[in-house]
Amino acid sequence: MDLNELKNKVRETPAFVFDEKGIDANLSQLVNLKKKSGCQVLYSIKALPLERVLKKAAEYLDGLSVSSLFEARLAKEVMGETGSIHLTTPGIRDDEFNELIELCTHISFNSINQYQRLIPSAITEESFGFRINPKLSFSEDSRFDPCRQYSKLGIEIEALDCIPKKIQGVHFHTVFAHQDFLPLEKIVVLLKRKFGHKLIELKWMNFGGGYLYNQILDQEPFTNLVRQLKTEFNINVYIEPGKAVVGNAGYLVSTVIDSFSSDGKSVMVLDTSVNHNPEVFEYQRKPNLLEEDKKGAYSYLLVGSSCLAGDLFGEYRFTTELKIGDRVVFVNVGAYSLIKANRFNGYNLPDIYWADKTNRVTLIKHNTYENYHQQWVE
Ligand SMILES: Cc1ncc(COP(=O)(O)O)c(C=O)c1O
């Protein structure tokens, strides 16, 4: 897709554009990884549960991974009777469990208590696992670290002396946007040390998400690990990436709607805000901008249009002057942006466009005042 043309191809802003070629390229890389290693790949739909993406993932991959009843229902709607649907969450409700076991093929319990409470009502054919917490941290920032102190995510590995007969698999997810396979290698060593040959009693292991498979050049450590687990223990390995499928295939196009000076800085107000990419505020992250030139002569503070003082994208340099009416494009915002988007202050959600393989850009979703009204008016 010609990125410079992209901003002129959407009718109104703010607008998310998802690039089919980019998603296909990411999925094809995962298919190669499957072929080389023998692992099975699920798309973690929490990153972007857009129907078109789910259908593509169902076509290329082995299934979907979900974290709630609504995600499980949507996944089942797309998958039908084919493929796998894996679920793990600290939030399984007793009154939802029966429906969840009908929808999902694999459920990993997040705590021993969750397992003991729910397992007696399980009478169907799905396969149960434990989400474990290997207590190996790979992030300095505890907000992204499932193995942080007092973690709510998974059963502490030390607390697990044996794996009950009804448990056929082990799930772990420990990193975020990671770019090497060292954490996986360390966790597998730990599991072998802890359970030894008893691992042969397991049918599957789910390595979770968190790895940017499309950006890791040396995939050999991964393929070796999967092959080793298959050979030594006859274990089926699953991975469930989200960001690696859609992260770099999503763009947010926005227009400058006001400009002024504040304490000597040029402030440019956009018709988007952290409402449309909440992680910018949550994690104080500066998203990349297509037009940014770090050596450019013009510097602007790009801000969102909400009332929140901290609704700021950051300071960016440009080679040419930026004016009201100009459009800018945030890149690499395909994952965890639209799904977290909200209508705070009554601002509409962005339009959604699909850029197909022929570079045709089509509007696929448009929200109106009626959608806002429906949410709040009885
Ligand atoms: C259990 C689990 N699996 C998969 C994922 C997907 O991770 P990513 O999008 O970083 O690949 C997440 C992300 O939070 C997760 O919590």
Image (cartoon, rainbow, N blue to C red):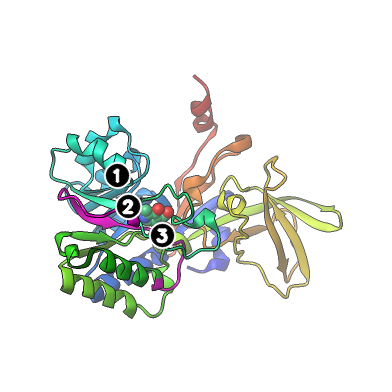
Residue contact between numbered discs 2 and 1, judged by CB atoms under 8 Å: yes
Mark before the other along the chain sequence, 1 or 3: 1
Q: In which quadrant of the rendered view does residue 268 lie?
A: bottom right
**Structural distance between the alpha carbons of marks 2 and 1:** 9 Å
Where 96 sits versus 31, above or below?
Answer: above
Query: Left or right: 93 with respect to 299?
Result: left
Label 3 Cα crowd, 10 Å radius (few <14 / some 14-19 / many 20+): some
Where 116 sits versus 30, above or below?
Answer: above
Mark before the other along the chain sequence, 2 or 3: 3
Label 2 Cα crowd, 10 Å radius (few <14 / some 14-19 / many 20+): few
Query: Left or right: 115 with respect to 251?
Result: left
Mark before the other along the chain sequence, 2 or 1: 1
Query: Viewer-proximal residue, 11 or 142?
Result: 142
Residue tagged 1: 112
Residue drawn at the location 23% of the way across and 49% of the way down: 79
Query: Which mark lies nearer to you, 2 or 3?
Result: 2
Query: Viewer-proximal residue, 268 or 321?
Result: 268
Q: Amino acid at mark 2?
A: Ala
Dominant SS type (magenta): loop
Residue contact between numbered discs 2 and 3, judged by CB atoms under 8 Å: no
Q: Residue furthest right?
A: 264
Q: Residue furthest top?
A: 378
**Structural distance between the alpha carbons of marks 2 and 3:** 11 Å
Residue tagged 2: 159
- Residue 128 location (% of width, % of height): 21, 48
- Residue 132 location (% of width, % of height): 33, 55
- Residue 247 location (% of width, % of height): 46, 61
Q: Which residues are magenta?
A: 157-182
Residue tagged 3: 135
- Residue 100 location (% of width, % of height): 25, 39
Query: Left or right: 184 with respect to 369?
Result: left
